[in-house]
Image: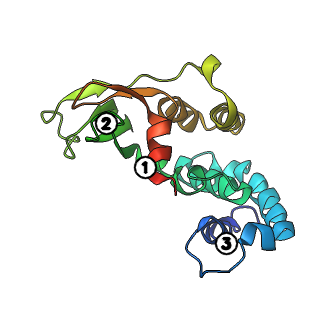
Amino acid sequence: MTATDRTMPLLLAASILASTDRPYGTPDPKDAYAAETSELIELAEEALSHPSLADSPERYVELLEALLAFEGVEVWGEQLHGLSGEEYEVPCPACEAENFVVFGECGYFSTTDSLYMNEATGHRRELQAAAISSLEGLAKRLHARALTDGQHKVADALTYIFGSAHCAECDALFQVDQAIVARWSN
């Protein structure tokens, strides 16, 4: 089986591993299947560096998310796919207004208008990308990995995910990644 043939089984395994929805008393699969999980990490690593992903940033992000799920990285092992959708919907930490944080073809901004694709609607606030030199921990690792794998569009989007935004409602400045983690933390 080639690296690209493994994609769908890897995504399914990652979804199962990342799920917290299991019957009471059922052991965490990461613990119960540690050896298998280690093998899945190796297979995901191999698939991520496969040349067939060069023209498929969406598939690359899915596999990167799977890798994070196998590694037990909470939130990002289930929510990194927002990179492919070029938006995250998060509440403002100050006023709780729902903000669409948009990065990609539609631009780089936050807005409270769900119809943001129409340029004439809603108040927009420009996003502030994180300086590459300021990236640390997971952000630095993901950014470096994307560059190494030739995924420059993904690397660029990561600077916005780990950057900051102004709430389009109250103008409070917040860290996008922290708002994402707060929204989807258990």
Mark closer to the observer (1, 3): 1
Q: How far apart in space, not on screen, are marks 3 and 2 (Cα)?
A: 32 Å
97 or 63, which lies in front? Answer: 97
Secondary structure beneath label 1: helix
Task: Tell me how the rendering is colored.
Answer: rainbow
State the residue at coordinates (58%, 56%): 62
Q: Where is residue 152 in the image (x, y as percent from the top left)?
A: 58, 33
State the residue at coordinates (52%, 58%): 186
Q: Is residue 128 above or below residue 43?
A: above
Q: Is residue 146 above or below residue 71?
A: above
Crowding around mark 3 (Cα neighbors within 10 Å: few <14, some 14 to 19, many 20+) is: few
State the residue at coordinates (79%, 74%): 32
Q: Where is residue 111 in the image (x, y as percent from the top left)?
A: 25, 35
Question: Disc 1 vs disc 3: Cβ atoms closer than 8 Å?
Answer: no
Q: How many labels does the image show?
A: 3
Q: Where is residue 112 in the image (x, y as percent from the top left)?
A: 22, 39
Q: Tag 1: residue type?
A: Arg
Q: Is residue 104 visible?
A: no
129 or 22, which lies in front? Answer: 22
Q: How far apart in space, not on screen, are marks 1 and 3 (Cα)?
A: 28 Å
Q: Tag 3: residue type?
A: Pro
- Residue highlighted by disc 3: 9
